[in-house]
Amino acid sequence: MKSIKVKFQNSEGQTLSGRLEFPVSQKPKAYALFAHCFTCSKNLTAVRNISRGLNQNGLAVLRFDFTGLGDSEGDFADTNFSSNLGDLEKAAEYLSENYAAPQLIIGHSLGGAAVLRVASRINSIEAVATIGAPFDPPHVKKLFVDGIDEIEEKGEAKVSIGGRPFKIKKQLIDDLEKYDSADEIKNLKKALMIMHSPQDSTVGINNAAEIYGAAMHPKSFVSLDGADHLLSDEQDSHYVGQVIASWAVRYLNLKTSENIKAMGQVTVRTGKDGFYTEIAAGDHQLIADEPESVGGTELGPTPYDYLLTALGTCTSMTLRMYADRKEIELDEAVVHLAHDKVHKEDCDDCENKGSKIDKIERKIELHGDLTDEQRKRMLEIADKCPVHKTLHSEILVESKLVD
């Protein structure tokens, strides 16, 4: 994904650090804003994967570090839930002034509680998604329960959260207690998606039920069965990103294509994450990858899978067009393809005994009331599909570097 560093000011004039990630077309259909979990950062793997899923569906995503965390300025001990809400408003303001106003806001854990409260303050927001969110913000106190007595007595304490030390002040606890969850969620007036794992031991599944019960329609719930609170299994975070993207498009005012790419033109981008590759074919977002056996993550088809896909789809479309034109009773054409390297039997270069050629095996099923003559003719027509002709013709590929 294309990711650029961004910086903007919080309400105290401190600089917050973020990353704005674009779909491969670099022409987003809409913008989303992400709020990470308590004491986490924008660079959490789960956050990156969720952003990736949104990018694949044409959405740009701004993820940033709250004040005092990650690369952002400020002292975490002086922050609270209210300051997090202010940071989110400033992030939305930054997007509005420099790109486009965010329409989707997503929050993980306490970030989910935050987006439930701040969404009504940001007029552009049309849809809200929460992941493992607590119903009541004070729920976060269980993370530092061992230090509560000291905080109450001395006004602050140093506690360990996720294996890292953080100074927590009483003002944070007092601030968390201010929020009336039920009324605020009821008055959200935005489309809501609630995602939660029944096995979440940090924020119990009952929180999702309470949020759902308090919210007005349209509201949806998706069970993240088997996932832990931090979505440490990458398959879970990839799933979350794809589901949110698919759900949100129903509620977002998506930009229509303005000739993003000329007909037949494709843009492909491979970053630092192994062989994972993003593809933009016009308005269509695709992905490619390689098998784990060669260092990939198998999140998408391989390049050769796409080659076979091109031939297979062209073949079946050509058969469909021919059958319609000739009024042949073809119900459907099914094409099976496989690619291999085989030894060349009639080798023109006899000195190279190990010469191999690419072989594509194409098996065609024709379903419908067809005569033997029609079936034979349609097999001949399959060889006349444009991609088949391209593969059998001389192809010139011109490559050049561009800025």
Image: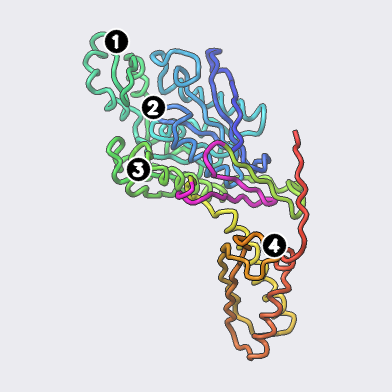
Q: What amino acid type should be assigned to the residue bearing mark 4?
A: Asp
- The residue under the point 71% across, 84% down is 327
Left or right? Give the position of 147 relative to 305.
left
What is the crowding at mark 3: few (fewer than 14 residues within 10 Å), some, or many (at least 20)?
Answer: many
Name the mark nearer the viewer: 1 or 4. 4
Residue 309 appears at what percent x and percent y?
Answer: 61, 62
Query: Which residue is label 2 attached to?
Result: 38
Q: Which one is closest to the eye, mark 3 or mark 2? A: 2
Residue at image coords 54%, 16%:
11
Residue 391 percent coordinates (x, y): 71, 64
Q: CA distance from mark 3 to mark 4?
A: 68 Å
- Chain part drawn in magenta: 272-294
- What is the x, y in percent for residue 106? 48, 37
Label 2 and label 1: CA atoms lie apart by: 20 Å
Q: Residue at x 61, y 36 (%)?
A: 2
Q: Is residue 253 magenta?
A: no
- Comes first in the chain, label 4 or label 2: 2
Left/right placement of residue 140 relative to residue 20 reads left
- Image mark for residue 155: 1
From mark 4 to mark 2, how far is it between C-alphas? 66 Å
Q: Nearer the viewer, mark 2 or mark 1?
A: 2
Residue 208 is tagged as 3
Q: How far is mark 3 from mark 1, CA to CA? A: 32 Å
Q: Nearer the viewer, mark 4 or mark 2?
A: 4
Label 4 SS: loop
Q: Quadrant of residue 328?
A: bottom right
Amino acid at pointer 3: Ala
Kindly indicate the quadrant of the structure image that contains residue 9: top right
* Cα–Cα span, label 1 and label 4: 84 Å
> Residue 47, how many percent across, how many down?
47, 35
